[in-house]
């Protein structure tokens, strides 16, 4: 599983891929840094996911008071079942496995999905090579034990 940062028509985005499947992606950003920040927030937030009923989703900011790094899902009841989406960080679209038979099954999937993202989804460039350590925020480097002995990393 990889979070791939790439450019498209002079805009930047990231895409979560596993094998040959695209599981999620962000909307286009004007620059690399904003796309990277969103990708980092997505992965770091996966350590503490929250799943809310769509009717309670407006209250999601209360979950960000103590920790701004959260992955917050919303589950909407539809005529055909329950639809899962990401509401925070913003501008993220789930592309696969978004329809479920129950709220509980959507919530369980969101938890397992988050665990996988946090544990194994490295952020890489469009050639699937790791980013230079200094391209990541200090918090991200510390969270995932990315070492860099360059003086500017201190």
Image (spheres, helix red, strand yellow):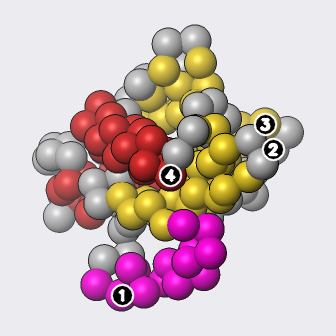
Residue drawn at (44%, 61%) of the image: 51
Nearest to viewer (mark 1 / mark 3): 1
Where residue 53 sits: x, y (%)? 54, 67
Magenta extent: 53-66
Mark 1 neighbour class, 10 Å CA radius: few under 14, some 14 to 19, many 20 or more: few
Instruction: Between residue 2 and residue 109, name the one nearer to us.
Output: 109
Name the residue carrying label 3: 8
Name the residue carrying label 2: 10
Mark 4 neighbour class, 10 Å CA radius: few under 14, some 14 to 19, many 20 or more: many
Disc 1 and disc 4 in contact, CB within 8 angstroms: no
State whether residue 109 is above or below residue 154.
above
User: Of marks 1 and 2, which one's residue comes earlier in the chain?
Assistant: 2
Nearest to viewer (mark 1 / mark 2): 1
Q: CA distance from mark 1 to mark 3?
A: 34 Å
- Give the main secondary structure of the magenta stretch: helix
State whether residue 80 is above or below residue 35.
above
């Amino acid at each position: 599983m990889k979070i791939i940062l790439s450019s498209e028509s002079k805009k930047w985005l990231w895409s979560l891929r596993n094998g040959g499947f695209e599981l999620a992606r962000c909307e286009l950003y004007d620059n690399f840094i904003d796309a990277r920040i969103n990708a980092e927030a997505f992965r770091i937030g996966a350590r503490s996911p929250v799943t809310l009923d769509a009717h309670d989703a407006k209250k999601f900011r209360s979950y960000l008071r103590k920790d701004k790094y959260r992955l917050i899902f919303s589950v909407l009841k539809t005529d055909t079942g329950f639809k899962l989406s990401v509401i925070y960080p913003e501008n993220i679209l789930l592309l696969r496995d978004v329809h479920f038979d129950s709220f509980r099954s959507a919530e369980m999937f969101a938890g397992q999905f988050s665990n996988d993202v946090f544990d194994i989804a490295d952020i890489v460039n469009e050639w699937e090579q790791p980013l230079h350590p200094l391209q990541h925020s200090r918090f991200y480097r510390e969270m995932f034990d990315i070492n860099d002995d360059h003086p500017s990393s201190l």
